[in-house]
């Protein structure tokens, strides 16, 4: 589980403790509240991809926020433990991104 819009490190710790107490899924991180990360929405929900296309700058900001806040390797381990046939593809992608 990934907490979203947390108010700070204490809030993130409280949320992680609550997740551990009642969920089978482990907490993988907490993305801090940042108005710049807010996605466009309308009265009854978020806009669809066709209605609210994210700019390159918005995607980059989201990517950086997730990279800073989420234990991506823990997520990958959980995902590939249940889908072992995908693990080589992930390893190749990681190696390529480091070049």
Image: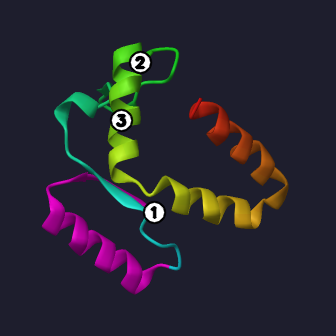
Q: Is the residue 5 above or below the residue 37 in the image?
A: below
Q: Is residue 26 left or right of residue 98?
A: left
The quarter holding residue 11 reads bottom left
Residue 64 circle label = 3
Q: Residue at x 63, y 41 (%)?
A: 94
Dot 3 and dot 2 residues touching (CB under 8 Å) = no
> Could you tell me residue 19's position as x and y percent?
38, 75
The quarter holding residue 70 reads bottom left
Is residue 37 or residue 28 the one in the foreground?
28
Is residue 40 or residue 24 the one in the foreground?
24
Q: Residue at x 79, y 49 (%)?
A: 88
SS category of the residue bearing label 2: loop
The quarter holding residue 90 reads top right
> Could you tell me residue 15's position as x and y percent?
27, 70
Q: Which residue is mark 1?
A: 1
Q: Which range of residues does the magenta coloring cover?
A: 1-23
């Amino acid at each position: 589980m990934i907490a979203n819009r947390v108010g700070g490190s204490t809030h993130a710790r409280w949320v992680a403790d609550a997740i551990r107490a009642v969920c089978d899924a482990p907490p993988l991180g907490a993305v801090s509240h940042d108005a710049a990360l807010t996605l466009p929405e309308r009265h009854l929900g978020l806009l669809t991809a066709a209605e609210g296309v994210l700019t390159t700058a918005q995607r980059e900001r989201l990517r950086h926020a997730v990279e800073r806040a989420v234990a991506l390797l823990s997520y990958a381990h959980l995902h590939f433990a249940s889908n072992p046939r995908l693990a080589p593809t992930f390893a190749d992608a990681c190696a390529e991104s480091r070049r």
